Structures are given as C-alpha cells and as structure tokens.
Amino acid sequence: MRRVLAGVLACVFAISANASLAQDKPPLKLGGILDMSSLYADITGSGSETAAKMAAEDFGGTVLGRKIEIVVGDHLNKADLSANIARDMIDNQGVEMIFDVAASATALAAAEIAKARGKIIMFNGPGSIRLSNEACGPYTVHYVFDTFAQANVTGLAAVKSGLDTWFFLTADYAFGQDLEKDTSNVVVKSGGKVLGSVRHPINTSDFSSFLLQAQASKAKVIGLANAGGDTINAIKQGAEFGITKGGQKISPLLAFVTDIDSVGLETAQGLLLAEAFYWDLNDDTRAFSKRFMERTKRVPTSAQAGVYSSVMHYLQAVKAAGTTDAAAVMKVMKETPINDMFAKNGRIREDGRMVHDMYLFEVKKPSESKGRWDDYKLLATVPGDQAFQPLSESRCPLVKK
C-alpha cells in the first residue's frame, strides 16, 4: 500500500511540476493581421481568427511546453497600418509567426517587417503573385491561392470555351493589377484578345461608369480583377445594367463562397470561378466545415480553411524541430508534405509557394441548389503543378536557376 501511495504521489508531483514548467514558459503567440471591418471581412476577418484558434485547440493547446495564443489586429486595408501592426506584434508582443494578412498591399507591407526581423509569415487571404516572386523571403509562405493560379484556371477554361475577347474591371492596387496582368497573359497565350481595361478605386460603391465602358467594348467577357465587396457590387450592378442579358459574360477572377451567397444564385448562376477549397468537396472538408459552422454560423472560405491548415502545419513543424527558430521550423515545413482537409500532398517550394490542387467550379442554378451554401458544381480539378506558376518562370531571388 505504501508503494502504491508513493507511486500515486510521484505521478501527482510530476504532473504538477510539468504544469508549473508550462506556466513558467511564455506563451507561443501567433498573430493574425486581418480585415475585421471592411470589404474583406467575410473572406478572412473573424472567421480567420476562429480557424486559427481551432487549429491551436486541435493541436492540443500547447507546444514545447508553451501555451499557444492567437492574437489579431485589424489593418483596415491600410498598408502602413499593417506594417505597424506587424512591427508591434513582433517587437512588443513577442509574436513568432504572422498569418493571413487579408489583402495584397497590406501583405506586401507586413512581409517587409517580417523579413527584416527573420520571422515566418504565412499568407492566406492575399493573392498577389509578387508575394512568391519579387517579394519572396526565406520565411515567407504563400499558402492558399495567387493571381497566376486564379488566372490560369479561370481564364484558360473561359477562352477554351469560346469566350475569347476580354475587358477588365480592375481594382487599382497590387492585387487587382497583378490579376489583370496574369489573366491577360493567359487569354493572349490561349489565342484570345484583350480589348481594354478600366481601373476603379478599392471599396467603391458605384460601378456604373466602369460597367458602361465594359459594356461598350462588346467584349464577350468582362473580367472582374477585384475581390470581396467590390466583386459583389460589380456583379449585382452588372445584372441591373442587363449586361449578361445582352450576351456578355461577367467572370469574377477571384470569388469566394461568401461572395456568391451575398450575390444570390439567381444573379450568380453560371459564373465560372477558381477556388482552392470548397466546404462540400469531400468528407474531410464537410467535417471541418461543420465544426467551423457551429462557431460562426457560416461555411469557411478557402482563405479561412487555409488559415487552419497553415497554422496546424506550422505547429507540427515547431514540435518536430523542437524550437521556434524560424530557419529550423521552415526547413521542416518545406520538407513535410501537407495532407489534411485543405490539401493532399501539398508542398512548400523554395519560393514559398505552397503547391496544391485548384478547382474550377460553376455556380449552380437556384433549381439545382439544395439550400444555402450549396452553390458550386465541380467542373475540373487542376493539379498544383499545372495551376501555379512554374519555378522556371519564378522571379524569386531564392530560386536557383
């Protein structure tokens, strides 16, 4: 009896000692720089914060004896504010990794801060191809999508189907400009023509003058090189102008399931779009999305699903490396394939691009939908090595040629 009692007491003391040790160590802070209140709030925002917290909880809540803590900041779609948040997170809050960053201009600003301080930054919401090209860094990961893949998947399919003349409505910042450029390249290489383009301010409410120019071009396709609220407003106002009834097709070059939900199937039906993730794709995506919906009352976007996957991949690498040192963790992340509800056999290349399958969807007719969020029909699965920019074309200085 004494021996049994002694064993029990020893276990209790050991558990207490480990708990005390964990309490003595500072938390491992991961920082999300998000759009919490503007036109990308539905795409990332509080949903990205929830996804990151889910990943931390599913991982077990601690790593290397440190409690995992998620902190977030709202960049208000301002590049200078994004840089200041990144600086504060790293310098004052002790954040070891930054995730999401929501938009391209804000991402490029935050990337420079993370690069200067040797910290890992993982992009889920932004799409500019520059993030894995000129702005790449040794600790930069572009995880979910980029303008090259969006253009390659959507633009190529459209031209092949006979939609070979284009006019672009482009958000006047890094992401929109890159998306127009990359899609134009795909259209021209595929034998199509670009008849013109017009740039609009980000977060504009009135697309009438831009849509009239697009309508007057007589292009078969009006490509929307924008995102979030801008895409939603352009599609809705295009329907009001009777553009699609007049024979022209509106193609959102980056759209999320939340955008389609806002537009409605009556207006959005028939749209072709590329996505990195869809909640109803398979059993794994449905299981994750069900848990996500229990917390948020809406399905996850591809960016939010990518946050969960990237945070989990980072934490697994920290555990395997036995340290939070950026170089050691990044080495493990690049050596380890990603297999989860977001990606199958995904991999992070030397330019920081996470390569994974992309999907071409068509938006369902209202009669085809079984209910809210049942929005997409899968047309094609495009392997990652065909969807994303090949390394041979990379402008990242880290890529050896």
Image: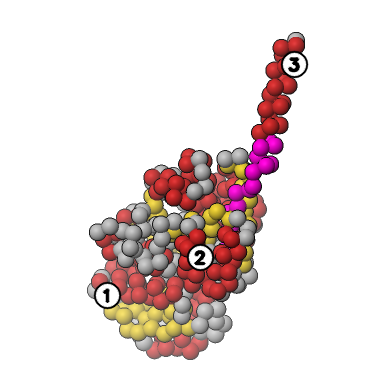
Residue at image x 40%, y 66%? 135
Q: Position of residue 214 (x, y in %)?
A: 41, 85
- Find residue 171 and name its label: none
Q: Is residue 58 above or below residue 92?
A: above
Q: Residue furthest top?
A: 1
Q: Position of residue 285 (x, y in %)?
A: 51, 49
Three-letter amino acid code of the residue under disc 2 = Ile
- Which of the two residues, 256 or 311, is positioned nearer the viewer here? 311
Residue at image x 46%, y 62%? 115
- Find residue 113 and name its label: 2
Determine which residue is flagged by label 3: 5
Which one is earlier in the sequence, the residue at label 3 or at label 2?
Answer: 3
Query: Which callout, 3 or 2, points to the residue nearer the camera?
Result: 2
State the scheme by which the image is colored: secondary structure
- State the SS at label 1: helix
Q: Residues within 10 Å of mark 3 (few under 14, many from 20)?
A: few
Quadrant containing the N terminus in the rendered view: top right
Report if residue 382 lies within the magenta region.
Answer: no
- State the SS at label 2: helix
Visible residue check, residue 366: no
Residue at image x 51%, y 43%? 323
- Which of the two residues, 137 or 231, is positioned nearer the viewer here? 137
Three-letter amino acid code of the residue under disc 3 = Leu
Which residues fall within the magenta stretch?
Answer: 19-35
Quadrant containing the C terminus in the rendered view: bottom left
Q: How far is disc 3 from disc 2 in space, using C-alphas?
A: 55 Å
Left or right, 194 with reference to 226: left
Determine which residue is flagged by label 1: 188
Q: How far is disc 1 from disc 2 in space, using C-alphas?
A: 37 Å
Q: Residues within 10 Å of mark 1 (few under 14, many from 20)?
A: some
Query: Which callout, 1 or 3, points to the residue nearer the camera?
Result: 3
Q: Is residue 148 above or below residue 168?
A: above
